Every structure is written in C-alpha cells, then in structure tokens.
C-alpha cells in the first residue's frame, strides 16, 4: 500500500500563486504593462521567476504598498502607479492584478478604476482579481484572459453585433510554451484562416536583440484584434479541466463570448498525442471546412511510424507526471497512447475535476493502473513515487530533487524550466510536438539504461 | 532623447586617478544625464527621484553630496528591490542549513524563495541536517484568511518537528498575516514550550520597510535575540573571528574560509553563508567581528560589541588587493608577530599566479567602462576588482542601501527617521555583565588606531569613486535602459531582472547578486575567476553577431554629441 500522510503544511509546492499567471497572460497582450496591486516584493519575485524561465526582459510594475497603505487602502497608490507607468512606458493597456495584500484589506479596484473612467489617457485599464490564497497560477492565467475579453467586448457592444462572412477563430490556448504558440500560428497560417490567439507572448517573451530601444518589447495580441473577438465565427479553448469547470458554471473567456455574443466555443484538451491532435485538426476542419494540410498529415505519418519503432523501449514503462492539471491530463493521454503507464498523475491544483478529466482521456485499462492526486506537493509526491518505482518522471524543473532521490531521469516540460536552456522553445503540442516529446522520453530512458549497463552499452 | 547633452568643463574629464576617460564619455555631463532620466516623470516624482540621482563630487575635506537613500519606491516605478520577507527569509535565514523555515502565508512567497538564491552550503557529513532543499509553507487558503491561520501554523510546526526533529524552527509572516491578526510570535512561544526546541517568529510582512533591507534588520535582530549567546563553550583556537555579512553566493565563503584557514584564523560563525544554528549560538565567543556587507549587518556588529565586548572592523574580500589588505587588518588586530608573519606568507604565496593572470587580462580590459547597480555593498566592493584590471566604474548605485553606505558612517547621526524606518524595531542592547569580556582595553584600541586600524568605520562608496561619476539609488528598469542608451558601457552589473534587457541592447551583463552560474569571486581564487569572467564578457566574439541599437541607428548616438 502507498503510505498516505496527510500533511497540513505544503512542503515544496507543485504550484505557485495566482497573480503570476495573470502577469504572464498580460505579457501576451501588445503594448501592455502588468501591474500588481500590492507589496513591491510580489512584482519583484514574479518578474524574477518568470525571467528565470523565459530568459527575456519582463517588466511588472507594483503599487508598492507601505504599512500605511495596508491600513488606509491602496487607491492613491494605484492611481499614482498608473500615472507613472503611462508616462514612462506609454502602454496601450495596463493589466492590473490584485494580490493577497490588497484582497485582504478589501480594496475595491473596479470602483477605483471606474472613477478614472477605465482609462488613463489613451491607456486602457484592465483588472483581474487574483488573491493568492485562492487557486493557483493557472487560475490567475485563465481569469486574466477572461478579464481582458470582458473589458474589450462589453455587453453594450451587443446591439452593434453583425456577423461577418470572413472566418475568424478565437483561440484561447491556455498556458503553453512560446514554441507551442508559434506552432499554432503556423497551423492557422497554413490553412489560411485568421486566428486571434489570446494571449500570445511568443514574440514578446522571445525576441531578437534590439535594433532600437524598446520600452515594451514588440509582440502580443493587439488590442484592436481583441476588440473584434465578438465578431469571430467560433472560439476554440484548450483545457479539459477548464471545460469541465465551465460546465459547472465557471465563466471562461470562451464561455463569456458564447453567452454574450452567441459565438460557439469548442472546448478540448491541449492537443498532445496523436488522438488529441487528431481531434484538434478534426475540429478545425469542422469549424473552417478546410482539410488538414498535407504537411501535418505527413507529420502524423512519421509520428505513428516512430511509435511502432520505439514501442520496444517504452511499452509498460512507468511514469510520474506533475504540473498544472490540464497539462498533466494531456500528457497522461499521450503517455497512455504509447503504452507508458502514468502511475502517478499529480498536481498542486485542486479543481475537483482532475480525476474526471483523466478518466475521460485514458482507456479503462490504463486508468485503473494510475493514481490521481490533486492538491499535492513534491514531498508527498516523492513518498508515493518511491513506492511506485517509476522509470522516469516528467514535468517542470521543480521535480529535479525527486528525480535525483529516485535516481530516475527527469524529462523537462512545461513551466518553469530554470535549470536548462530552451524551456520556452520546447514544442509540446501537435504531431510535431508529440514527436519531440516521444523522442526525448525514449532518449532519456536509453540514456539511463546506457549509464547503468555493464555490458552492451554502446549499442542499445 | 529631447535634450542635447552638453560637454563639461575642460578640467572635468580628468578624474581622480589621473587617467582620462574615453572621449565619448568625458563629454557626457552627468547633470544633463540626470535631467534626461527625470524628464518623463511627473513633477512630484521627478523631485523625489532627483535627490536619489547625484553627480559625485568630493570637496577638499572629502565631503560628498547628500544622497537620498532607503526611501520608499514610488508606485509604478519598476524597481529592482524586493520586500521585507525576501530580505528576512530569503537572504539572511535562507543560507542557514539546519533551521527549518516555515513561511506563514499563501503559497507564492515560499515558492519564490525556494532555492532561488545561489547561497551554497556544505554540511560536514551526510548525517548533518540540511533543510535547504525544503520549502515549507502554510499555503493559506480563503478560510484561513477569514478565520485566522494560527491553528494551521501550529500544526505545521508540529509536523516540521515530527518530520525533521530540528534544533530550531523559524516562522516568517507574509503580507496577509499581519492584517488578519495572526500572531506568529505567540504561536512560536507556545510551540517552543510544547516541543522544547528553539522556535521564533519574524514579523517580516512584505509591506514593512522600503526594501529587503528592513527584512535583513528584522532577521538579524531575531537571530541576535533568540539564538546568539546560547552556547558559551569556548572554541580552542588562537585567532577567533566572526565573518558578518557574507552569504556564500557561488561559494565565496568557501574561498574565504580556505584563505583564513591557511593563515590559522578560525571562524566561529558566519552570518549567514554556509552557517548553522550552533555557529550563531556560539558567535559571542569570537574575539573580533569582521564586517563584509556593511548594509545588511553593521547593527549586529554594534550590538555584539555593546553586549559582549567584541570590537568590529570593516573588511572586504572582493579583489586580490582588498583581500590581502583585509588579512593584514585582522593580523594587526591580534598583535601577534607569528600571525602577522603567517599572513604575509600566505599573501606572498597566492599573489604571483594572480598577478600573471591579472596582467594578461588587463591588456584586453584596460580602459573599459563598467556600471554597477547592485546590493548594499557589492556596487562598492566590485569596483576594486574592476580597478585591478584597469576598468573604470563611471556609474553605480545600490538597490537597498542607506545613506551611510553611500556617504560613510559619519552621517549616521544625521539620518532622519521616517515612518518606514520607525516601523523596524531597534533593539535596546545593554552590556551582559556575565558574558561581557572587553577584548581590548581602550588604550590598546587607541594604539591600534594609531597604527591605522580603523574600528567601527566605513567611509562609504562615494568618497572612493571618481568625481563626476553618476550615483543612482534604487535605479529603475526605465532609468537602467536610459543609462545604457547614453553611456553604452562595456559591462553592466546588476541582477537577473535587468539582465536580458541589457543584453538585448548588445551590452555584456554580469549578475552580481547570483553571479550567473559562476563564482566564487571573493578572495584570491575568486579574483582570478572574476578577471577571466570579465575578460570573457567584454571581449567575447558573441557580441559581434549582433548589432547594438546605436550601430544600427547611428543618429541615436549623434544626439549626444556636444557642440
């Protein structure tokens, strides 16, 4: 039996705080400066953390609470912060996220912004509530995306709504890597359909050296496009957990547009693995009427061919997966598909839908062989993993300590990756991303076999 | 750029050491740069910032301008500063390996301070406690904020005790904790009584004070109150010192230990690189306190002197010459010819290899320009290393220092106590009649001072910098990018938050908080590492691949040309 300790404290968390997700999402909007309403340490910590993964400049401003602000409220600080940012950076938008400090004292930010007319000069002000004691970074990310869509597609625009003939797809990919976002852009480019991807930090958080000084790096979803999202044909939203929670009444960016403007939102898991990517292309075909380009058919062909060739190395191998619930679900779907048993699927999140989403994606035979743990930290994970004896673990850099003590390889995917370069350039999605993950996993297993083999190690 | 920068007077391109600055730089007037930096700020903000941006001036009495420091960052100005919690938990208590740290708050604070600094630790055996890879948090949820989190904290402490059986547990309050009225100190007292180990809390909510400096203060006060003086056993050693304000980033402390060990000098405790609980408990038995980072710890040195009679001197192990000088200072203090001789032997043994490399590197680096915006001491200390390879620091500033770190300790009586500093507890320390031992008589101290050994003394950064160097306190991200544009330094030293924006501009960047992935840079071996690293940075061909903004758009630089 697996030892079960129910700890009260979190030891080595497998999640981080809500505003970080919001700050990242705001970085995916053109000419936007994120602003955290709280103590300056929050901004500094989150900048520092995001930068260690992206290895790019990331600015996050703060309203710099002092003790007096904490007692008397943060309105004056917030207004001053907005004024200063507008003057220094001349942004089109300031994305404001709350923190546990401003939430605990009950600052009414929407009221403060209303007083300002929701604009500072020509800078649009967008607010999202992200108390760090509720949810995790992924919730902050989704909330921020919804808040942006909400702000620029208000109910009042409903009267003027006229559907166009040109097909435009709203795409809410969730928290993916830069390379993933670039891949999505490539796909829509290839099928010649315009997709408004929100957010899109793939250029801003991975740009070339500057030819000209840039107060805010180039890239990101332009506001003018976000304002047109209410005119799109369909929305596509990734995330099976997100989908399940929308069914239970949570509002997402996609469901908001659906409710307000009648734009149907197609929801599906993150497309990792053949099955999930098939579904993705099928949905695109259905929505746009365009066939999947040959290029992708070929990618699929090569992938399946390699599945066959590589099966001998991975069949019945055991893996521990951890990270955001949606990401883990999709990875589990992929591993299940190639015959690896994801013996432990763990997340620091606790949406309540984790088991369901895994049950939905995995075959019965595999599902009964796995353990699903939400609200889990790395210490508990390691305790479970010791018992389960995985062949490798897959997830972000934070699992390194576990990999080291289990003496198994860590396949680095997702966020954050701060102990390797290229975390932002990992492609996880589509046939091509799946191909890379497949190769990486097999090579990691081969590497450890090679390292530990006394004989026959040169030709595995 | 709107304003054109005018040339300075004919004498001003001569600096203290007599070497002329490169032409393009000698023509930049720091007063004009200051105007440029302030131009985009609203009037009130510009007024405040103008007191934190100064062209250095040194008059005949060695007086420097008054520098506004340790003042609150203005909202919306993207500062590089961290918070009180970061200073307390991350910087001071983080490097101690055998105290279990519990963050009381929502998950973010603990997560971001979990092994994100490169402070290294080396337990003497595998059996020794090392909790540094753990990050414990009460991970407060909505209900804890509404109903209070004290019970959860108590359970967390009990758990930590059951799992780790540590000597001590410390608790760190984050922003919401103070607001909802959780009392970490009473919880600590209660659990200390229950479990019989040392447990103490820190009120280091992020909104306290103006920067991480407040957190350093709260942490050090806590260690002084709850740990120092608990173990009176006297270590058998001839020359016992404490090393205060050394955090073993990139293994700096290991190199310093090696050198001191070669000299026969014993370290009783280091605050707090590679440290243990027992070192702190025994630290009052040392005979000399040596202060490395003046900012983070000078008050501890003062308190140790008042309470236990240990004098303190400022030392600096950054730079080969500074290291030699610091060793000589320690030897002078102990007044033992054997030690003085030993120290000279060590220096004589180490220096030749260093000199060979230094001279070689200097050939390629001399005349190049550095800018340093880091820390509470490093922006000063690292100028030594740059000097050794012929590089000049034309602009520098601290992230979280106070006026005395800029202007010297002589300004201490003039520093105004404001609302922010008032909130940080000052301990009232008295002589401990039982444990106080005067290490030196007044006469002996006087004699040593006559020999040039300065006690309780730090002159600050500004008197040692060139006149007309631009000093900026709490430089913002925006100002940083403006400075790059104007000065185009050969190297810029700061932290990871600034790093990539600087490199995007085609300027080599060295992290001096975490040393990138390098180090040690302290001591003799550290100096060599640093020379080589700077040589690699400023002379690497990788920069040839990219075109800096002013190369692509030469008209940009033309705007700074003076008539």
Image (cartoon, coloured by chain):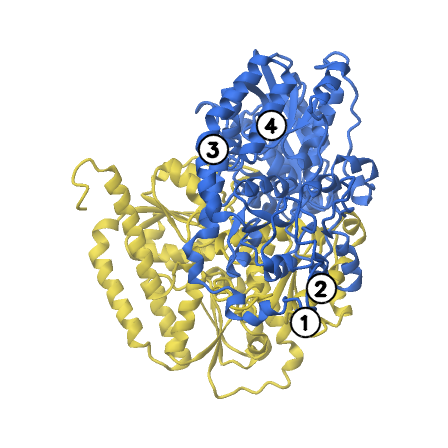
Residues at marks 1 and 2 touching, judged by CB atoms closer than 8 Å? yes
Q: CA distance from mark 3 to mark 2?
A: 48 Å
- Give whichever of discs 4 and 3 has the lower sequence position: 4
Secondary structure beneath dot 3 equals helix
Residue on which the image places disc 2 = A82
Badges 2 and 4, same chain: no
Q: CA distance from mark 1 to mark 2?
A: 9 Å
Residues at marks 4 and 3 touching, judged by CB atoms closer than 8 Å? no
Residue on which the image places disc 1 = A123
Q: CA distance from mark 2 to mark 4?
A: 48 Å
Chain that is yellow in the image: A
Secondary structure beneath dot 2 equals helix
Mark linked to residue B326 = 4
On the question of residue A249 being in view, the answer is no
Q: Residues within 10 Å of mark 3 (few under 14, many from 20)?
A: many
In terms of depth relative to the viewer, which is nearer, A292 or A83?
Answer: A83
Q: Chain of mark 3?
A: B
Quadrant assignment, res B550? bottom right
């Amino acid at each position: 039996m697996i030892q079960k300790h129910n700890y009260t404290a979190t030891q080595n968390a497998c999640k981080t705080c809500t505003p970080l997700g919001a700050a990242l999402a705001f970085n995916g909007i053109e000419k936007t400066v994120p602003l955290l309403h709280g103590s300056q340490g929050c901004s500094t910590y989150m900048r520092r953390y995001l930068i260690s993964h992206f290895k790019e400049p990331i600015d996050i401003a703060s309203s710099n609470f002092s003790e007096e602000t904490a007692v008397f409220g943060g309105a004056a600080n917030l207004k001053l912060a907005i004024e200063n940012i507008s003057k220094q950076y001349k942004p089109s938008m300031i994305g404001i996220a709350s923190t546990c400090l401003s939430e605990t004292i009950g600052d009414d930010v929407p009221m403060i912004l209303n007083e300002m007319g929701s604009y500072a000069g020509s800078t649009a002000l967008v607010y999202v509530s992200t108390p760090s004691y509720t949810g995790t970074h992924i919730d902050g990310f989704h909330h921020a995306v919804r808040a942006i869509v909400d702000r620029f597609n208000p109910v009042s625009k409903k009267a003027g709504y006229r559907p166009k003939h040109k097909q435009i797809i709203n795409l809410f990919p969730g928290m993916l890597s830069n390379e993933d976002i670039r891949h999505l852009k490539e796909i829509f480019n290839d099928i010649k359909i315009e997709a408004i991807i929100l957010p899109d930090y793939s250029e801003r958080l991975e740009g070339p050296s500057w030819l000209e000084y840039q107060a805010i790096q180039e890239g990101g979803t332009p506001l003018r496009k976000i304002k047109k999202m209410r005119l799109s044909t369909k929305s596509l939203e990734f995330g099976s957990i997100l989908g399940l929670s929308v069914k239970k009444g949570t509002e997402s960016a996609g469901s908001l547009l659906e409710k307000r403007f009648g734009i149907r939102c197609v929801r599906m898991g993150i497309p990792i693995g053949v099955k999930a990517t098939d579904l993705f292309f099928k949905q695109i075909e259905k929505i746009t009427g365009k066939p999947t380009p040959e290029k992708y058919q070929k990618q699929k062909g090569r992938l399946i061919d390699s599945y066959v060739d590589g099966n001998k190395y991975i069949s019945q191998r055991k893996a521990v997966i951890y990270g955001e619930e949606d990401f883990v679900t999709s990875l589990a779907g992929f591993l299940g598909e190639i015959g690896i048993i994801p013996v432990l699927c763990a997340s620091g999140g606790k949406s309540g839908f984790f088991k369901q989403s895994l049950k939905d994606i995995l075959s019965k035979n595999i599902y009964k062989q796995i353990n699903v743990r939400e609200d889990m930290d790395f210490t508990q994970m390691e305790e479970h993993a010791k018992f389960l004896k995985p062949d490798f673990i897959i997830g972000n850099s934070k699992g390194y300590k576990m990999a080291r003590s289990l003496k198994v390889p860590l396949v680095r995917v997702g966020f954050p990756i701060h102990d390797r370069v290229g975390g932002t350039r990992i492609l996880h999605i589509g046939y091509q991303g799946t191909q890379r993950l497949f190769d990486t996993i097999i090579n990691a297993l081969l590497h450890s076999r090679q390292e530990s083999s006394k004989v026959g190690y040169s030709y595995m | 750029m709107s304003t054109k920068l005018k040339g300075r007077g004919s004498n001003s391109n001569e600096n203290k050491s007599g070497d002329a600055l490169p032409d393009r730089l000698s023509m930049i007037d720091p007063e004009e740069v200051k105007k440029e930096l302030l131009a985009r700020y609203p009037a009130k903000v510009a007024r405040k910032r103008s007191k934190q941006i100064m062209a250095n001036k040194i008059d005949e009495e060695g007086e420097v301008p008054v520098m506004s420091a340790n003042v609150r960052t203005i909202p919306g100005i993207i500062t590089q500063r961290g918070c009180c919690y970061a200073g307390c938990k991350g910087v001071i208590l983080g490097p101690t390996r055998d105290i279990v740290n519990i963050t009381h708050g929502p998950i973010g604070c603990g997560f971001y301070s979990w092994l994100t600094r490169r402070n290294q630790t080396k337990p003497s055996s595998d059996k020794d406690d090392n909790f540094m890879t753990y990050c414990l948090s009460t991970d407060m949820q909505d209900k804890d904020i509404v109903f209070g989190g004290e019970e959860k904290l108590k359970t967390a402490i009990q758990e930590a005790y059951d799992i780790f059986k540590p000597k001590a547990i410390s608790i760190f309050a984050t922003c919401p904790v103070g607001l909802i009225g959780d009392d970490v100190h009473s919880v600590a007292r209660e659990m200390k009584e229950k479990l019989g180990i040392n447990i103490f809390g820190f009120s280091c909510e992020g909104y306290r004070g103006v920067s991480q400096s407040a957190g350093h203060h709260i942490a050090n006060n806590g260690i002084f109150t709850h740990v120092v003086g608990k173990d009176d056993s006297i270590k058998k050693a001839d020359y016992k010192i404490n090393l205060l304000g050394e955090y073993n980033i990139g293994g700096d402390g290991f190199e310093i230990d090696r050198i001191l060990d070669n000299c026969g000098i014993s370290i009783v405790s280091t605050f707090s690189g590679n440290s243990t609980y027992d070192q702190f408990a025994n630290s009052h038995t040392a005979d000399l306190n040596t202060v490395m980072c003046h900012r983070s710890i000078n008050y501890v040195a003062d308190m140790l002197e008042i309470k236990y009679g240990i004098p303190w001197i400022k030392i600096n192990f950054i730079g080969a010459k500074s290291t030699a000088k610091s060793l000589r200072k320690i030897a002078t203090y102990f007044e033992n010819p054997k030690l003085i001789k030993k120290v000279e032997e060590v220096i004589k043994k180490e220096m030749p290899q260093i000199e060979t490399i230094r001279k070689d590197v200097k050939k390629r680096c001399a005349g190049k320009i550095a800018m340093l915006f880091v820390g509470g001491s490093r922006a000063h200390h690292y100028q030594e290393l740059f000097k050794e390879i012929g590089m000049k620091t034309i602009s520098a500033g601290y992230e979280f220092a106070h006026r005395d770190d800029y202007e010297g300790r002589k300004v201490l009586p003039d520093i105004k106590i404001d609302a922010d500093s008032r909130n940080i507890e000052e301990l009232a320390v008295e002589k401990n009649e039982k444990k106080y031992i005067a290490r030196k008589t007044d006469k002996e101290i006087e004699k040593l001072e006559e020999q040039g050994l300065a006690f309780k003394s730090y002159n600050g950064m500004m008197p040692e910098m060139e006149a007309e160097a631009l000093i900026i306190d709490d430089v913002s991200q925006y100002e940083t990018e403006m400075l790059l544009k104007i000065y185009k330094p050969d190297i810029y030293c700061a932290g990871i938050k600034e790093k990539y924006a600087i490199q995007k501009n085609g300027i080599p960047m060295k992290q001096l908080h975490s040393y990138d992935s390098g180090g040690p840079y302290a001591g003799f071996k550290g100096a060599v590492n640093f020379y080589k690293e700077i040589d690699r940075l400023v002379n690497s061909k990788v920069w040839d691949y990219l075109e800096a903004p002013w190369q692509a758009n030469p008209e940009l630089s033309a705007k700074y040309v003076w008539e």
